[in-house]
Image: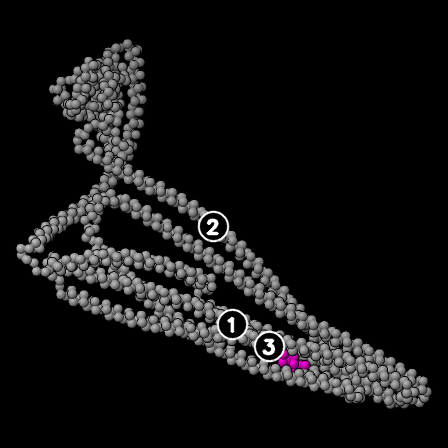
């Protein structure tokens, strides 16, 4: 029977998940809550999609960050490699510097050694002079011995032999002294060449050092510029990424806010936009134009301030150019002085040439004349002394001229560098001036167009206001008209002032242009003068080189003459010796002594000459050393001046605002490029604004035409009209239409006021709904807490029930064993009787429910009766289920379910088993009841838990 009822219910569709019709307000509320939860689920799905999109964007961002990190690591690796290369170069420079210092020390040691050798040579010369004096004394002492020897040497052969012996000894001593002199002169020449070579090496090393220092500084600057560019590009990229991420974050937040707000306010906003768009278009346009006018005025003020600042900069640059012009004049004066000095030196050169000619003539005369050896030697000594003095003076003069030339060349190079810097600054100022001019012209054009357009729009607005006042029957206030007229006069005054300021600025700009042209001409003339001075300098350098070559040739000729004279002297001595031998050897001891004294005097003269030569060479070397020291000091001072000048230039340029370091040319170039890019962007924006304004002007012109046509028609309508004419009839029609339009306008205003009230009420309702949603959420949380506590209680009760089941099973087994042992069947019969009764009650309840369903749903009554008739089942009469309520109580359901459960589960005849069926039947009753309830989604679990809790409470109470 139970299986048949279950099959009938399945045929009817009363299985799990079947939804009962709404019977009360609680089910309605549950259904509304289900719909609301479905909406929330849709919104949560949309939020989930947004979060997934954000996660994707975050992943993309993470990949971008990884790529940037790899790029930055590469940059850091490159930077570390560059730092290591710079350290290597620095170490190499230190090694070269130490090497150069060591070479300088070696040169100083060599110079000291040469000085010591010269001192030793001087001491040797002094010793030789002392020896000569001792020899003289010995000669004077030995006169007596010579007189004695005269007596002994009466024979001519013996006397001649003695003279020959003395001559040979004298020749030997002369040869020794001559060899010593030659060796000393060769050593002095080698020392001089070594000193000259060392000085040249030092100069070459200094030049190499300067070149290497320049190259190193240039490389360091280039690397720093590259690193700054890289750092700036990285900063720009990071800022761009930050702005992008901030924008994405804001966009997502705005999307979420929009999705939350748009669902509730979309319909209202559409309706309001349709109603208010037509009324606010003109007002928005006028406000937008006023804002643009204010922005343009602010930009004009900024440009005026920028022009003032640029004028101040121009005045500063003008003063700097005046200073440069003064410096150029000073250089001109110095060049003129140098010209005069060069002319004086040329005159001195001509005098020297004349003296050389005179000396040549005297030499020729000396060659032709016949003089004694003593007179010739004296003349030659005098000539040599003069020539050496002249040579020393010429060397000093040439050294002084070379130093002056070096100073002039350095000064000229400085002036050329300053002229180049001034030209660069002038070109930059010209470019900046041209840019400012172009911007000023564009802004003036734009301002003129905007003023005309604003004036036209004001006129149109005034006309429209007048027309509206005439149509609506309103009268304009005189005070407003007076205020507007005052405003117009004030604007005219401001326009006049601005025009005067523009004229003054144009005059100042023309003056500035003239000054710039004059400065450019002065710079060009200075450049021409510098070129001419360079040519003059090259000519003078060539003349000096020629003079030095002539001096070298003269020195070589002089040395050849000296050699020839020395050879002639030796020939004369040999000739005298031969004559003495030929003249029957008639020399006496006195004549020999005279010859000896003459020879000694000649040797003394030669020694003195050699000493003077050595002294002169020593003086020349000391002078050259002093000149080299002065040149080194000048170069050091020049380096200090250049450093101070560089520091001043860096200080004038200012500091880098980012890192506080000195400004560089690369930074300035990058800054100018950035300014150019910003100006380009600004120009593009202004072009867009101008195009937009032109389009607006065209539209306003069209509206003006329409307004003018309307005004013409209005003027024509103001003419006198006949009472019976068609125009009067048309006027009446128009008046009627006007009144109708006014009525419509009133109705629309009333409708608009109603809509505004509805909107306010809807806003209040929305606020109330938000509050209700919050309250429901709070209640939901409270119910969840209650459900969690109930679930805990249920688990505890299930544990208790499981324990009670175990105890009951034990008791049942004991009772069954006792019944089997005692063979008592009364308990089994009682149990079967109870099961039959429970089955009959359950069947009656099922039939009553089917009858209630047939009564509620009349359209299904025939189908239900047909199914029951096929299975020989009759419905109970109306009186049986009219007494029962529409919905069965928990107690009856619990009792019937307990009977069913006992009938199905047990066949024993014990009352305890009936109690167990009651305990376990409560759970099955709840399950059977849940089959008839609607199957909600996950959002309705809280309502089920509350219903189950109430059923369990009722079963426990039973």
Magenta range is 391-406
C-alpha gap between disc 2 and disc 1 = 45 Å
First in sequence: mark 2 vs mark 1 = 2
Q: Quadrant of the C terminus?
A: top left
C-alpha gap between disc 3 and disc 2 = 60 Å
Q: Label 2 belongs to which residue?
A: 71
Tell me if mark 3 has few (under 14), some (14-19) or many (20+) residues whose alpha carbon lies within 10 angstroms of its own. some
Residue shown at the point (90%, 87%) measured from the top left? 583
Q: Which mark is residue 416?
A: 1
The answer to whether residue 686 is magenta is no
Q: Label 3 belongs to which residue?
A: 540
Tag 3 and tag 1, C-beta contact below 8 Å: no
The residue nearer to you, when weighing 93 against 409, is 409
Q: Nearer the viewer, mark 3 or mark 1?
A: 3
Q: Quadrant of the N terminus?
A: top left
Image x and y of residue 567, in percent: 80, 80
Tag 3 and tag 2, C-beta contact below 8 Å: no
**By what rule are the colours in the image chosen?**
one colour
């Amino acid at each position: 029977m139970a299986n048949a009822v279950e099959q009938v219910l399945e045929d009817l569709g009363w299985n799990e998940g079947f939804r009962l019709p709404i019977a009360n307000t609680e089910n309605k509320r549950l259904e509304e809550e289900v719909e609301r939860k479905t909406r929330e689920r849709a919104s949560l799905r949309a939020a989930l999609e947004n979060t997934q999109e954000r996660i994707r964007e975050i992943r993309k961002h993470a990949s971008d960050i990884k790529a940037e990190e790899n790029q930055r690591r590469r940059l850091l690796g490159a930077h570390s490699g560059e730092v290591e290369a710079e350290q290597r170069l620095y170490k190499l420079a230190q090694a070269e510097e130490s090497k150069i210092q060591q070479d300088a020390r070696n040169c100083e040691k060599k110079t000291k050694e040469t000085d010591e050798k010269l001192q030793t040579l001087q001491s040797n010369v002094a010793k030789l002079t002392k020896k000569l004096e001792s020899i003289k004394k010995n000669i004077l002492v030995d006169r007596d011995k010579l007189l004695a020897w005269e007596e002994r040497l009466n024979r001519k052969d013996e006397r001649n032999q003695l003279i020959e012996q003395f001559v040979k000894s004298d020749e030997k001593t002369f040869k020794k002294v001559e060899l010593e002199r030659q060796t000393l002169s060769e050593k002095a020449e080698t020392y001089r060449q070594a000193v000259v070579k060392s000085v040249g090496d030092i100069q070459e090393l200094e030049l190499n050092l300067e070149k290497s220092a320049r190259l190193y500084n240039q490389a360091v600057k280039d690397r720093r510029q590259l690193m700054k560019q890289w750092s700036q590009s990285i900063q720009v990229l990071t800022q761009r990424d930050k702005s992008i991420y901030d924008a994405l974050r804001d966009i997502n937040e705005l999307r979420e806010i929009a999705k939350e707000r748009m669902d509730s306010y979309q319909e209202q906003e559409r309706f309001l936009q349709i109603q208010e768009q037509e009324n606010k278009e003109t007002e928005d346009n006028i406000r937008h134009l006023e804002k643009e006018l204010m922005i343009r005025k602010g930009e004009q003020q900024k440009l005026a301030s920028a022009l003032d600042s640029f004028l101040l900069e121009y005045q500063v640059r003008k003063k700097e150019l005046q200073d440069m012009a003064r410096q150029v004049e000073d250089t001109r004066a110095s060049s003129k002085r140098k010209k005069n000095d060069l002319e004086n030196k040329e005159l001195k050169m001509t005098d020297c040439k004349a003296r050389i000619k005179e000396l040549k003539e005297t030499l020729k005369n000396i060659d032709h004349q016949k003089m004694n050896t003593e007179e010739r030697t004296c003349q030659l000594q005098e000539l040599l002394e003069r020539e050496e003095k002249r040579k020393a003076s010429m060397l000093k003069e040439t050294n002084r001229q070379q130093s002056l030339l070096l100073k002039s060349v350095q000064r000229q190079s400085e002036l050329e560098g300053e002229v180049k810097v001034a030209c660069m600054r002038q070109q930059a100022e010209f470019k900046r001036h041209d840019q400012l001019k172009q911007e000023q012209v564009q802004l003036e054009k734009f301002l003129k167009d905007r003023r005309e357009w604003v004036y036209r729009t004001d006129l149109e607005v005034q006309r429209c206001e007048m027309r509206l006042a005439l149509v609506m029957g309103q009268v304009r206030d005189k005070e407003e008209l007076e205020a507007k007229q005052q405003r117009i006069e004030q604007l005219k005054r401001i326009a006049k002032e601005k025009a005067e300021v523009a004229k003054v600025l144009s005059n100042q700009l023309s003056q500035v242009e003239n000054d710039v042209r004059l400065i450019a001409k002065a710079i060009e003339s200075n450049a021409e003068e510098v070129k001419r001075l360079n040519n003059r300098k090259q000519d003078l350098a060539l003349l000096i080189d020629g003079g030095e070559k002539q001096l070298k040739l003269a020195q070589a000729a002089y040395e050849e003459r000296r050699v020839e004279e020395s050879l002639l002297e030796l020939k004369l001595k040999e000739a005298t010796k031969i004559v003495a031998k030929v003249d029957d050897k008639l020399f006496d001891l006195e004549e020999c002594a005279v010859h000896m004294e003459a020879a000694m005097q000649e040797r003394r003269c030669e020694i003195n000459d050699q000493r003077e030569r050595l002294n002169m060479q020593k003086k020349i070397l000391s002078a050259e050393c002093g000149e080299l020291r002065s040149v080194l000091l000048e170069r050091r001072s020049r380096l200090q001046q250049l450093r101070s000048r560089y520091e001043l230039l860096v200080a004038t340029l200012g500091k880098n605002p980012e890192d506080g370091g000195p400004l560089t040319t690369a930074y300035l170039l990058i800054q100018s490029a950035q300014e150019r890019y910003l100006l380009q962007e600004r120009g593009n924006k202004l072009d867009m604004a101008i195009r937009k304004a032109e389009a607006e002007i065209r539209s306003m012109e069209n509206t003006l035409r329409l307004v003018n046509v309307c005004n013409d028609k209005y003027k024509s309508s103001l003419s006198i009209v006949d009472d019976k004419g068609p125009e009067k009839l048309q006027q009446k029609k128009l008046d009627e239409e006007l009144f109708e339009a006014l009525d419509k306008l009133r109705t629309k205003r009333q409708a608009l006021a109603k809509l505004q009230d509805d909107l306010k009420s809807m806003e209040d309702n929305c606020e109330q709904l938000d509050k209700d949603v919050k309250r429901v959420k709070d209640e939901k949380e409270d119910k969840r807490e209650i459900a969690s506590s109930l679930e805990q209680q249920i688990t505890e009760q299930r544990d208790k029930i499981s324990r009670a089941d175990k105890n009951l099973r034990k008791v049942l087994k004991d009772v069954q064993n006792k019944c089997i042992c005692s063979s008592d069947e009364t308990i089994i019969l009682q149990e079967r009787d109870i099961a039959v009764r429970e089955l009959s009650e359950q069947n009656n309840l099922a039939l009553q429910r089917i009858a209630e369903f047939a009564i509620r749903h009349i359209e299904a009554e025939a189908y239900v009766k047909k199914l029951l008739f096929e299975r020989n089942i009759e419905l109970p009469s109306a009186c049986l289920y009219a007494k029962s309520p529409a919905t069965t109580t928990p107690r009856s359901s619990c009792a019937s379910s307990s009977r069913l459960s006992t009938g199905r589960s047990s066949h024993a005849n014990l009352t305890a088993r009936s109690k167990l069926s009651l305990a376990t039947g409560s759970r099955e009753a709840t399950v059977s009841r849940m089959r008839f309830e609607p199957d909600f989604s996950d959002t309705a679990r809280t309502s089920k838990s509350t219903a189950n809790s109430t059923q369990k409470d009722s079963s426990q109470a039973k």
